[in-house]
Image (cartoon, helix red, strand yellow):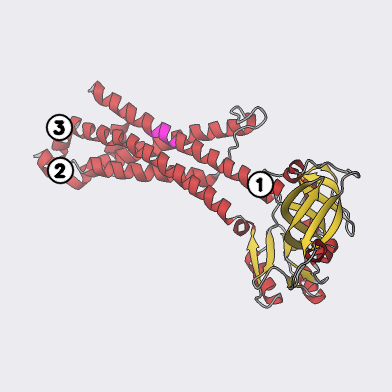
C-alpha cells in the first residue's frame, strides 16, 4: 500500500488528542457537506426553473423553422414541398405567414401578429395543449384563434355576433393614399377559440387560415413567411438542416428551438452560471476551515513527522500525506453532501413540499450533469486547499 495514503487514511479516521483540533476538523467537514448539498440543491432548482420557463416556448415553437434570408417571405414550389416530405427525420411540416396588423373590436384597437397556418399546423404543434377556451380553427374559413391577452385587452369573447372582430392589413404598393379603403384590406373574422401559454405569448398572435392570410396580404398561393417542422425522435438535426439548405439553394435560414429563443436561453444560462459562481465562492470560504484544520493537524503531528523524516522519509512524501488527507476529506464530505442534496431534490420532486404559490411547487430537476459539476467543484477546490495547507510541511519545520 502507498505509504502516504496509508498514513493519511489513519489520520483521517483517528481523533486527535487535542480537542480543539477535533472541533476544527468537524467544522471543516460540516462546511464541505453543507456546501456540496446547498450547491446541488440550488443548481437543481435553477435547472427546474429553466425547464419550467422553456416549457412555455417548447409548447409553441417548432423543432425547426425555415425562413427567408432575403426578405419577409419566399416561394415554395410543389417540387420543394415533395422533397421536404421525403427527408428522413421530418415528422411533419407546416407553411405559415406572420405579419403585424391592426385588429378592431367594439371600438378598441390592438396591433399584433396575424399568423396564417395551414391544415398541418396542428401536427407540428400540439394546439390542444395551448387551448384555453373554444376550439381550434377550421381550414379554409374565416375562423380565428386569439391569445388570452388579446381577448382581455379588447374585452372580447367568443361567438359575439353583435360586435364584429375586424382585421386591417396594409395594402402593398406605392402612390398617394386618399382613403382608408385604399390603404387597408379589411375583413371580418370569427373568433372560435382562445389560447393561453404565457403572458408574453398570449399577446403575440391571432391565428387564421393560411389562404385567408395570403389573400389579405395579397400574397401568391406559393408565397409564405416560414415553414415550421416537427422532427421525428432521434432525428439528425444537422443533417436535416443541410438537406433543407440544398432544397432551397442556400436562400433560407434554418433555426432550431434554442436559436428561436436565443435571448431567453442566454438569460437562463447566465443566471445559472451566476448562481454557480456565487455558491462556489461560499464553498471557497468554507474550505478555509479545511486549510486551517490541516495546518493544525500538521502542527499537532509535528513530532511524528520529525520521526518519519529522521527515518529517511522525504519531505515531499510527508506533504503528500496531508494533501491526500485533505483531498479524501473533500471527496467524502462532498459525496455525503451530494447524497443529502439528491434526497432533498427527489423528495421535492415527488411530494412538492415547497411551493411558489398554493398550486405551483418549486420546480426541481435531478440531473447527472449537476452531480458531476458539484462533485468536480468540491474535489478541485478541496485539492487546491490541501495543496496550500500541505505546503506548510517544510524542511525548516522538521529540523
Asked if 176 appears above or below 29 in the picture, the reply is below
| Mark 2 or 1: the one toward you | 1
**Mark 1 / mark 3, whichever is N-terminal:** 1
Q: Which residue corresponds to mark 1?
A: 200
Q: Is residue 112 magenta?
A: no
Is the residue under label 3 in contact with that under label 2 (CB below 8 Å)?
no
Q: Position of residue 233 (x, y in %)?
A: 71, 57
Query: Residue extending furthest front?
Result: 178
Q: Which stretch did the figure color magenta?
A: 32-36
Residue reaching furthest to the left: 399
Quarter of the picture containing the C terminus is top left
Q: Which mark sits nearer the N-terminus, 2 or 3?
A: 3
Residue lying at 25% horizontally and 26% vertically, measured from the top left: 21
Q: Which residue is mark 2?
A: 394
Q: Residues within 10 Å of mark 3 (few under 14, many from 20)?
A: few
Residue 305 lies in quadrant: top left
Secondary structure of the residue carrying numbered label 2: loop
| Magenta stretch: helix, strand or loop mostly | helix
Q: Position of residue 339 (x, y in %)?
A: 49, 34
Residue at mark 3: 303
N-term-proximal mark, 2 vs 1: 1
Residue 77, image x and y in percent?
Answer: 79, 75
Q: In the image, what residue occupies the spot 72% across and 69% down?
A: 73
From the viewer's perspective, is the residue at label 2 or at label 3 nearer?
A: 2
Percent x, y of residue 207: 79, 54
Amino acid at each position: 500500500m502507498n505509504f502516504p495514503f496509508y498514513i493519511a487514511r489513519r489520520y483521517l479516521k483517528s481523533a486527535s488528542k487535542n480537542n480543539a483540533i477535533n472541533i476544527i476538523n468537524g467544522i471543516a467537514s460540516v462546511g464541505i457537506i453543507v456546501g456540496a448539498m446547498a450547491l446541488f440543491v440550488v443548481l437543481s432548482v435553477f435547472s427546474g426553473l429553466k425547464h419550467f420557463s422553456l416549457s412555455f416556448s417548447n409548447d409553441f415553437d417548432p423543432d425547426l423553422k425555415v425562413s427567408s434570408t432575403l426578405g419577409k417571405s419566399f416561394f415554395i414550389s410543389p417540387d420543394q414541398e415533395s422533397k421536404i416530405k421525403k427527408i428522413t427525420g421530418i415528422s411533419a411540416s407546416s407553411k405559415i405567414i406572420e405579419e403585424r396588423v391592426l385588429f378592431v373590436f367594439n371600438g378598441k384597437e390592438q396591433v399584433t401578429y396575424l399568423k396564417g397556418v395551414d391544415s398541418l399546423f396542428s401536427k407540428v404543434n400540439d394546439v390542444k395543449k395551448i387551448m384555453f377556451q373554444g376550439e381550434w380553427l377550421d381550414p379554409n374559413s374565416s375562423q380565428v384563434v386569439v391569445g388570452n391577452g388579446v381577448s382581455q385587452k379588447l374585452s372580447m369573447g367568443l361567438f359575439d355576433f353583435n360586435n364584429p372582430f375586424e382585421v386591417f392589413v396594409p395594402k402593398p404598393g406605392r402612390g398617394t393614399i386618399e382613403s382608408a379603403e385604399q390603404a387597408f384590406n379589411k375583413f371580418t373574422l370569427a373568433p372560435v377559440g382562445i389560447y393561453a401559454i404565457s403572458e408574453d405569448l398570449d399577446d403575440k398572435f391571432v391565428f387564421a387560415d393560411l389562404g385567408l392570410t395570403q389573400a389579405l396580404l395579397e400574397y401568391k398561393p406559393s408565397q409564405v413567411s416560414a415553414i415550421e417542422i416537427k422532427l421525428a425522435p432521434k432525428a439528425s438535426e444537422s443533417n436535416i438542416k443541410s438537406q433543407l439548405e440544398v432544397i432551397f439553394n442556400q436562400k433560407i435560414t434554418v433555426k432550431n428551438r434554442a436559436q428561436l429563443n436565443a435571448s431567453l436561453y442566454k438569460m437562463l444560462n447566465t443566471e445559472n452560471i451566476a448562481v454557480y459562481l456565487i455558491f462556489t465562492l461560499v464553498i471557497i470560504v468554507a474550505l478555509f476551515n479545511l486549510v486551517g484544520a490541516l495546518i493544525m493537524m500538521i502542527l499537532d503531528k509535528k513530532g511524528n513527522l520529525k520521526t518519519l523524516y529522521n527515518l529517511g522519509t522525504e519531505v515531499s512524501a510527508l506533504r503528500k500525506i496531508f494533501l491526500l488527507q485533505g483531498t479524501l476529506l473533500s471527496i467524502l464530505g462532498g459525496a455525503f453532501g451530494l447524497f443529502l442534496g439528491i434526497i432533498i431534490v427527489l423528495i421535492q420532486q415527488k411530494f412538492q413540499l415547497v411551493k411558489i404559490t398554493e398550486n405551483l411547487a418549486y420546480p426541481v430537476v435531478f440531473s447527472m450533469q449537476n452531480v458531476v459539476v458539484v462533485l468536480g467543484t468540491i474535489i478541485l477546490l478541496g485539492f487546491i486547499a490541501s495543496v496550500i495547507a500541505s505546503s506548510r510541511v517544510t524542511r525548516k519545520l522538521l529540523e
